[in-house]
Amino acid sequence: MISPVHGHYRRCQAEIPLIVLFIIPGSALREADTLTERLSRMFAERGEKVEVLNAGIGNYNAERYVGLFFRELTGLQPSDIVVNYFLRDAEALEPGGGNILLRNSELAVTLWIAATRLAGKTGQSSITDHYKAVYADNMPGFLAMQASLRQLADYGKANGIRIYLAMTPDVHNLAHYELGFIHDTMRRIAEQDGYVFVDLLPDFGTLTPEQVWAMPGDPHPNATGHELMAKAIFPVLAPR
């Protein structure tokens, strides 16, 4: 699994374009299969030298990964920033980072997800109801997400950085997807802030959990999902 980028990283050649991604690969995914590595190979196949780095951290929301960028990563001076936005990025998280085991162990996260589903409501209706609440206009997490993305967008504009928001769908039930209202909301927010918006839902089609989950109990996209994302995002990044 690819490790996130931290402040100790230094660019090898400052003149080479650098794309910083915010995405969580998920457990049981080989580094070679990640979106980061796939995009790197796509640029290399075109004969272009482009660095592609992942700055995503497990169980972070938008407020936290944007905060991480400003604390540790501005020195990278990226040419492009791609926010691989997931629906949970608007959820409010408890102060202090929550459970240290969940922050640092993919196995713990997977077991926690499975236990949570056994203990609570299951099914598409509960997922839809949950996200309707998360994206209500007055919810703190929703407001913090908007403020954070706007801050990142303003920084990009001020520093000549191209910014993109790739909207990643929830992959529990793609065949009967009920969360399109969030995609519409995020398109509006992204376009207002000046992001190039890429909706990845059409690229995932009607894949089943067995076809796209990283592993049973872990609904991060697997190698197939990362391949689909790379094919959708690369044409937007490629014109340079």
Image (tube, rainbow, N blue to C red):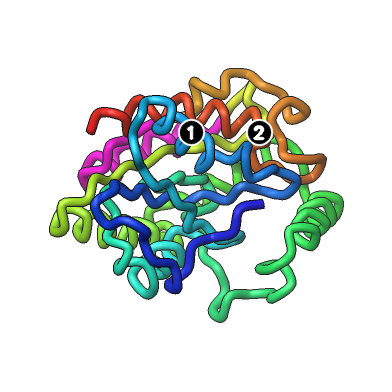
Q: Which one is in front, 196 or 9?
A: 9
Query: In this rendering, would 216 be left or right of 30?
Result: right
**Relative to 142, does residue 16 appear above or below in the rendering?**
above
Checking the image for residue 41, the label placed there is 1
Assign the C terminus to one quadrant of the image: top left
The residues tagged by marks 1 and 2 sit, at their Cα atoms, a distance apart of 15 Å
Picture coordinates of residue 179, whole percent (x, y): 53, 34
Residue 223 circle label:
2
Q: Residue farthest to the bottom?
A: 96
In the displayed structure, would residue 64 be above or below residue 207?
A: below
Q: Tell which of 116 and 84 is nearer to you.
A: 84
Q: Is residue 140 visible?
A: no
The amino acid at mark 2 is: Ala
| Residue 209 screen position, x and y as percent | 73, 30
Q: Residue at x 74, y 37 (%)?
A: 123
Horizontal and vertical percent position of residue 10: 39, 66
Q: Secondary structure at mark 1?
A: helix
Judged by depth in the image, the label closer to the viewer, 1 or 2, is: 1
The label shown at residue 135 is none
Q: Which residues are magenta?
A: 178-198
Residue 171 within the magenta-colored segment of the rendering = no
Disc with the residue nearer the chain's start (1 vs 2)? 1
Q: Is residue 187 magenta?
A: yes
* Residue at point 60%, 44% (across, down): 129
